[in-house]
Image (tube, rainbow, N blue to C red):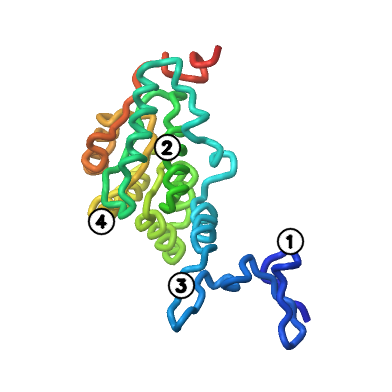
């Protein structure tokens, strides 16, 4: 009988047990335990950081396509306001405290101005630093949560995931028509994170004032959480899809 932990590995990573079973490991030093016992003390293996980084990416919910969005391939050259937003995003990453007890950041305003790209660039940079980020595309998740409200176990599980993530990226907040249920779901998530000092990265086509008009409790909390990192884009001239390309 063969027992395979990981396929497609080099033969040097295959061990044969006394029962003639074959076990494949990513790391032979610790046999994928991430720690090595030395003098009755558990010492972190050299592979520990790599395995944790892999898990952060796997659990983020960020697609391979969005993983490609970074600061290096963001075009800020066509407008000074976009250039300032780029600098603010990089500053946020630079000043980010790994304890996550720091401010949030919110990008608001004009469609096509690069809000999602900058949000993703921040998320990808934080994950490279070993900080877990969870991606929440607003429309898809709101629809799914509302459809499963009667399934209490599922609803609580998903909500807790968004509420307790180290960093939560909400993309396209309040996109489309907005119902009372939408507002209640977002308030529950934002309020929990506000009370527990957990940061959010938010992109939204509405201004802060418009978010406040939808729900003052949500808007005021987001503003307070992001104070100093509220990045606004105003005017159609900032739409990269229309004006940023030569």
At label 1, counting other C-alpha atoms closer than 10 Å, the crowd grade (few under 14, some 14-19, many 20 or more) is few
The residue at which mark 4 appears reads as 196
Q: Quadrant of the C terminus?
A: top right
Point 45% across, 17% down: residue: 77
Considering the numbered disc 4 on the image, is that residue within a helix, a strand or a loop?
Answer: loop
Residue 147 image position (x, y, % from top left): 48, 53
Is 65 on the left-hand or right-hand side of 120?
right
Is 213 on the left-hand or right-hand side of 46?
left
Q: Disc 3 and disc 2: Cα gap in Å?
A: 36 Å
Q: Disc 3 and disc 1: Cα gap in Å?
A: 28 Å
Pick whichever, 34 or 225, lies toward us. Answer: 34
Q: Earlier in the sequence, mark 2 or mark 4?
A: 2
Q: Is residue 188 visible?
A: no
The residue at which mark 2 appears reads as 119
Q: Disc 2 and disc 1: Cα gap in Å?
A: 34 Å
Q: Is the residue under label 4 in contact with that under label 2 (CB below 8 Å)?
A: no
Point 32% across, 29% down: residue: 231
């Amino acid at each position: 009988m063969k027992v395979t932990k990981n396929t497609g590995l080099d033969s040097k990573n295959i061990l044969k047990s006394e029962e003639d079973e074959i076990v494949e490991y990513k790391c032979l030093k610790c046999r994928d335990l991430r720690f090595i016992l030395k003098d009755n003390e558990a010492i972190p293996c050299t592979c520990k950081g790599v395995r944790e980084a892999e898990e952060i990416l796997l659990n983020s919910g960020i697609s391979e396509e969005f993983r490609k969005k970074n600061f290096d391939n963001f075009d800020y050259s066509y407008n000074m306001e976009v250039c300032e937003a780029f600098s603010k995003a990089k500053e946020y990453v630079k000043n980010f405290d790994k304890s996550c007890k720091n401010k949030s950041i919110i990008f608001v305003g004009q469609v096509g101005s690069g809000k999602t790209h900058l949000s993703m660039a921040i998320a990808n940079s934080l994950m490279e630093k070993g900080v877990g980020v969870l991606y929440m595309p607003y429309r898809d998740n709101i629809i799914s949560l509302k459809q499963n409200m009667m399934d209490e176990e599922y609803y609580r599980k998903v909500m807790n995931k968004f509420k307790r993530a180290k960093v939560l990226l909400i993309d396209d907040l309040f996109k489309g028509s907005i119902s009372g249920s939408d507002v209640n779901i977002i308030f529950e998530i934002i309020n929990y994170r506000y009370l527990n000092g957990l940061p959010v990265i938010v992109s939204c086509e509405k201004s802060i004032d418009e978010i406040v008009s939808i729900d003052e409790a949500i808007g005021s909390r987001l503003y307070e959480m992001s104070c100093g990192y509220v990045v606004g884009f105003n005017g159609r001239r900032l739409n990269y899809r229309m004006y940023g390309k030569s």
